[in-house]
Image (spheres, rainbow, N blue to C red):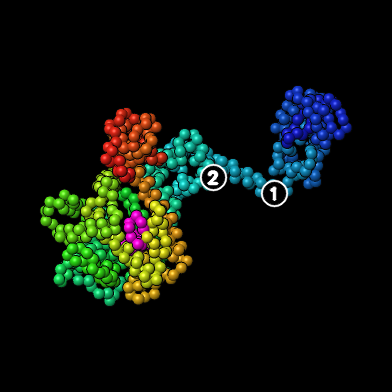
């Protein structure tokens, strides 16, 4: 005697070896002996053999029309054997009964299971909805396969238009476009970024990195929303000075300028002038909301995203040839460069010149300061400011800049194209701690620490940078900055570029004009601005570092050197000598930090932003006298 039974959701057949009433010992078609409950037995039969029954029933079930079976069965619950008898018009053979069972079981949309071997036809509305779902899945699978084929062929499917960023940076795996992209990546062996780059979804690898940042930090884009224009301050006194700024050639947000006037009886009156956008709009305005959301200008090689709209920047930047609203810190200085007193004012400052590094550095540097150098406009003022900066630096007991550190300047010519896309990169470098660096740094440290004390003494809260125990943090309470050697340090000198400085400027203006501060003591909004700024500023700086690394790699690919020279930092980490590109060299043997090595360039990747090199030889051991050289 044979039985057809259900086990683990599958139908099986076997030979009865022992009948124990409630259970049976059965040998299945594979020769395995199993114990089954009698309740799991669906059919008893004597012929054909179990294996033949399953084979023949499976073949016959394929020939049964599911839709016809659904139409002819009644609305009530039924057993498969009963239905088989009605369908065939006679007592069904074991093969016929099993064929009907297999067909009913294989069509759960048409027939709902109600127990062992029992079914009920699906209601019409439920069936139609289920069939519509199946058709939708079929069409979706067809669309996925079509999109996959286009991607494999190197073409971008039209369905991908407008959603490339989402596919790359935050893919929803339930979307058919993502499924198609993942399948195409498997077929081609390429990552999603490389495949979409190949298909022309991205003009170059640069857009992959830049667009990721925009997707994460500027999901609504970089365009400014509608805003009320800034108000031009009126009634401000005009300073009797001729101020000049010192900036890089690419700087458009000119925040600071200086002036030097002789004092009666000897000495000088030196002015530090900071652009005052805080006079053009107030806290709670649309422009404040814009600045509060962005918190800082974002810098990167060849581009920047400003904190404030161009209209506001142009209204308050310290551009030459006009009077600009500013907060001024005046220092009364004796001939021996000791500071007698200082005074802060809110006023209009005439800007006479915007000096640029590339024009001034050749004639104003350490060499020209020692041997006199050539004459040039503003030489007297610059020399005096540098002398004062030297005195201020000595008074703090801390250097304003490490003279053995190197600053790198990145210039991208977007009009030129390379094999890697638009943009030809030029990377220049200059030693930090030049006379101009020291001059500007010391003046800004003095202004920020002086105005920080002003707020603290007035009992008006501000946002301070503090350092203790080697840790730098931001706080709303005046605290020492050990690294700079000052009692307190409130960022106030870049209000066009940093929200912290703008906040402090509102507070400073309130103190100087005896007005109501924008932020009261223990303001929750002030603390929130501090926290948000710290997080956002760190993310912006990290993005700038990533993009500088990317452009270093583009520079390397432009030059296409077979070998490069690098300095060992630690273990197998090295830094190129020509540009600030750091990377690991797996083949590098043990070297002393500071050693110079020669490497073969084997390849590079602009998506992962990595370079592959091999160690060739050691060029030199480290110089003990330069062991304290700071790393980039």
Q: Circle 2 is placed at which residue position?
A: 173
Residue at the extreme right of the image, as rendered? 21
- Decide if residue 488 is on the left or right side of residue 146: left
Badge 2 marks a residue whose secondary structure is: loop
Which secondary structure class fits the magenta region best? loop
Q: Circle 1 is placed at which residue position?
A: 126
Residue drawn where x is 29% and y is 62% of the image: 446
Above or below — where is 69 with respect to 357?
Answer: above
Specify the label residue 480 is tagged with: none
Q: Which residues are magenta?
A: 481-500
Q: Provide residue 92's location: percent of width, then percent of height.
A: 82, 32
Q: Provide residue 578's location: percent of width, then percent of height.
A: 27, 40
Does residue 452 appear anywhere in the picture? Answer: yes
| Cα–Cα gap, marks 1 and 2 | 28 Å
Residue drawn where x is 25% and y is 57% of the image: 394
Residue drawn where x is 46% and y is 43% of the image: 157
Residue drawn where x is 76% and y is 25% of the image: 32
First in sequence, mark 1 or 2: give its number: 1
Badge 1 marks a residue whose secondary structure is: helix
């Amino acid at each position: 005697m044979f039985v057809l039974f259900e086990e683990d959701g599958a139908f099986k057949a076997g030979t009865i070896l022992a009948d124990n009433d409630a259970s049976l010992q059965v040998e299945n078609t594979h020769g395995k002996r199993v114990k089954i409950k009698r309740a799991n037995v669906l059919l008893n039969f004597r012929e054909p053999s179990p294996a033949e029954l399953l084979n023949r029933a499976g073949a016959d079930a394929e020939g049964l029309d599911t839709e016809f079976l659904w139409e002819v069965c009644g609305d009530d619950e039924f057993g498969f054997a009963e239905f088989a008898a009605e369908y065939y018009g006679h007592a069904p053979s074991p093969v016929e009964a099993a064929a009907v069972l297999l067909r009913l079981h294989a069509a759960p949309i048409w027939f709902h299971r109600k127990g062992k071997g029992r079914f009920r036809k699906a209601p019409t509305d439920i069936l139609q909805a289920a069939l519509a779902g199946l058709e939708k899945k079929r069409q979706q699978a067809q669309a996925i396969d079509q999109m996959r084929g286009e991607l494999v062929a190197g073409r971008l499917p039209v369905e991908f238009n407008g959603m490339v960023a989402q596919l790359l940076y935050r893919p929803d795996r339930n979307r058919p476009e993502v499924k198609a992209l993942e399948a195409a990546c498997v077929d081609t062996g390429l990552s999603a970024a490389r495949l979409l780059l190949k298909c022309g979804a991205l003009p170059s690898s640069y857009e992959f990195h830049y667009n990721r940042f925009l997707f994460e930090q500027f999901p609504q884009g970089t365009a400014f929303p509608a805003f009320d224009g800034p108000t031009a301050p009126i009634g401000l006194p005009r300073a009797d000075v001729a101020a000049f700024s010192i900036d890089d050639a690419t700087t458009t947000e000119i925040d600071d300028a200086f002036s030097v006037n002789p004092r009666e009886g000897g000495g000088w009156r030196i002015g530090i002038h900071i652009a005052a956008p805080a006079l053009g709009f107030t806290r709670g305005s649309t422009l404040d909301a814009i600045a509060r959301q962005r918190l800082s200008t974002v810098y990167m090689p060849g581009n920047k995203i400003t904190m404030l709209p161009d209209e506001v920047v142009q209204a308050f930047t310290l551009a030459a040839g006009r009077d600009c609203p500013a907060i001024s810190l005046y220092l009364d200085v004796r001939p021996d460069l000791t500071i007698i007193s200082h005074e802060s004012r809110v006023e209009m400052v005439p800007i006479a010149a915007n000096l640029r590094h590339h024009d001034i550095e050749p004639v104003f540097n350490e060499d020209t300061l020692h041997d006199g150098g050539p004459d040039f406009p503003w030489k007297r003022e610059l020399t005096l400011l540098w002398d004062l900066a030297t005195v201020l630096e000595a008074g703090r007991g801390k250097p304003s800049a490490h003279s053995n550190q190197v600053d790198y300047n990145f210039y991208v010519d977007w009009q030129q194209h390379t094999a890697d896309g638009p943009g030809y990169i030029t990377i220049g470098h200059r030693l930090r701690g030049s006379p101009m660096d020291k001059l500007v740094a010391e003046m800004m440290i003095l202004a920020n620490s002086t105005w920080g004390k002003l707020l603290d003494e007035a009992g008006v809260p501000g946002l301070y940078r503090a350092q203790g125990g080697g840790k730098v943090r931001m706080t709303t309470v005046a605290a020492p900055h050990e690294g700079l050697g000052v009692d307190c340090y409130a960022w106030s000198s870049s209000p066009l570029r940093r929200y912290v400085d703008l906040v402090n400027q509102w507070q400073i203006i309130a103190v100087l004009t005896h007005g109501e501060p924008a932020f009261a003591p223990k303001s929750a909004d002030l603390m929130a601005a501090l926290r948000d700024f710290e997080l956002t500023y760190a993310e912006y700086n990290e993005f700038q570092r990533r993009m500088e690394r990317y452009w270093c790699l583009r520079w390397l690919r432009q030059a296409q050197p077979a070998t490069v020279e690098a300095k060992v930092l630690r273990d197998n980490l090295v830094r190129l000598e020509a540009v600030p590109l750091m990377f690991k060299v797996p083949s590098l043997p043990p070297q002393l930090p500071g050693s110079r090595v020669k490497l073969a360039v084997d390849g590079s990747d602009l998506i992962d932003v990595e370079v592959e090199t091999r160690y060739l030889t050691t060029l030199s051991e480290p110089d003990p006298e330069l062991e304290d050289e700071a790393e980039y």
